[in-house]
Amino acid sequence: MKIKLLHVSEINRYVFDKSLTWAQYYEPSDIDTLVNLGYDRTDVTSQLKIIGWSDEYWFPVPNTTDIGSFMFEYRKAKFKTLSGKVLDGFLINSGHAITLFGNKKDWSVNVNLLNLLKKNIAEVKDDLGLNVKENLLPLEVQVSFKGIETIFGKKG
């Protein structure tokens, strides 16, 4: 199987129509994992050489892959607010961060840096179609890849 590499700047809502999960090239052992998943070693090595072995590139992960096979993974997800509104986006790695697809832009939220969200919260809610008085967090998370369910942004 041939590999398709995308620069991190190309990761958007539409790439998740092609693959439910995207992973970042991070270390040489990723090549062995890709080969075990059916990718052609010569093609993978050639493509990585072309981009200078950069870790700024991502590739589609087959649905048969185990969770956590790669150091950095983006997984397509649905997020439900307390009021029941469903938002699209993706879960990052084990769930410490998410990206929500707004009408005007994508919004990244890191559970460890929620104070950074406060200054833009009105703009975020407006772009996501939420009422200004509605809480953004916590969010119920449903990940299409492997049917994972979790809660993001729950206190304590």
Image (cartoon, rainbow, N blue to C red):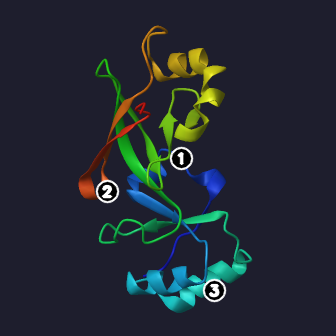
Q: Nearer the viewer, residue 38 or 82?
A: 82
Q: In which quarter of the image is residue 18?
A: bottom left
Q: Residues within 10 Å of mark 3 (few under 14, many from 20)?
A: some
Tell me the quadrant of the picture where the C terminus can be found: top left
Label 2 close to label 1 by CB (< 8 Å): no
Q: Residue at x 61, y 53 (%)?
A: 10
**SS category of the residue bearing label 3:** helix
Tag 3 residue? 46
Residue 61: image x %, image y %?
42, 67
Percent coordinates x, y for residue 117 in the rendering: 61, 27
Looking at the rendered structure, the secondary structure element under dot 2 is helix
Q: Is residue 107 above or below residue 85?
A: below
Nearer to us of marks 2 and 3 is: 2
State yes or no: discs 2 and 3 in contact (Cβ < 8 Å).
no
The kind of residue tagged 1 is Asn
Q: Which of marks 3 and 1 is nearer the N terminus?
A: 1
SS state under label 1? loop
Q: Which of 142 and 60 is in front in this view?
A: 142
Residue for badge 2? 145
**In-image side of 109 versus 140 (left or right):** right
- Depth check, front residue: 117 or 9: 117
Q: Which amino acid does label 2 sit on?
A: Phe
* Disc with the residue nearer the chain's start (2 vs 3): 3
Is residue 79 positioned above or below 71 on the image?
above
Mark toward the start of the polypeptide (2 vs 1): 1
Nearest-to-viewer mark from 2 and 1: 2
Q: What residue type is labelled 3?
A: Ser
Q: Name the residue under label 1.
A: 12
**In the image: residue 19, left or right of residue 26:** left
Q: Please identify the residue farthest to the left as the structure is shown.
A: 147
